Amino acid sequence: MLNLQLDRETESHLAEILAAEQTNSEELVKRLIYEHWLIVQSHPLKTRPAIVERRGEDSEEAKTIVERLGGHPEYLLQDAHQELSSRSTRKRLVAEYIVQKHDKIQSKNELKS
């Protein structure tokens, strides 16, 4: 059981969020707590950023994981397939790679026999 007293501005923000997300306050609070827990878990204890009430655009939480890691390595993108943003394309390419790797291992095993 959680009981909160919110000021008018915060209550107004909450109402807007609930309307936009089409959810209830209980589910929203659960999701926010879980998301914040993930952020806390992703930082080692000594390097955890201080939790601030207002998160600006430059805050660590506002960045994507790729941005936090320094962006995409350019050498990986040079020979990349043009449609790698498509999940089905990535899935197909990974499957092809696995089949090729498996075939290579099988042929090596057959040569040893």
Image (cartoon, helix red, strand yellow):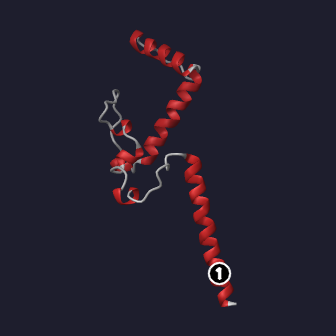
Residue at 56 percent of width and 30 percent of height: 30
Residue at 44% from the left image edge and 41% from the top image edge: 39
Label 1 packing within 10 angstroms: few (<14), some (14-19), many (20+): few
Find the residue positioned furthest to the top: 8
Q: Is 99 situated left or right of 44 in this image?
A: right
> Disc 1 on helix, strand or loop?
helix
Outermost front residue: 82
Counting from the top left corner in percent of width and height, residue 19 is at: 53, 15
Q: Tell whether 19 sits left or right of 79.
A: right
Give the labeled residue for mark 1.
Answer: 107
Residue at the extreme bottom:
113
Q: How many marks?
A: 1
Dividing the image into 4 quarters, which one contains the C terminus?
bottom right
The quarter of the displayed image where residue 97 is located:
bottom right
Q: What is the three-letter code of the residue carrying label 1?
A: Ser
| 55 vs 90, nearest the viewer | 90
Pick the residue in front: 90 or 73.
90
Q: Nearer the viewer, residue 34 or 110?
A: 110
In depth, the one of 38 and 71 nearer the eye is 71
State the residue at coordinates (33%, 41%).
49
Quarter of the image that includes the N terminus? top right
Relative to 28, say whether 13 is above or below. Answer: above
The vertical placement of 69 against 101, above or below, is above
Q: Position of residue 35 (x, y in %)?
A: 49, 36
Residue drawn where x is 32% and y is 36% of the image? 59
Q: Where residue 87 sits: x, y (%)?
A: 56, 47
State the image coordinates of residue 108 (x, y, percent, origin top left): 62, 83
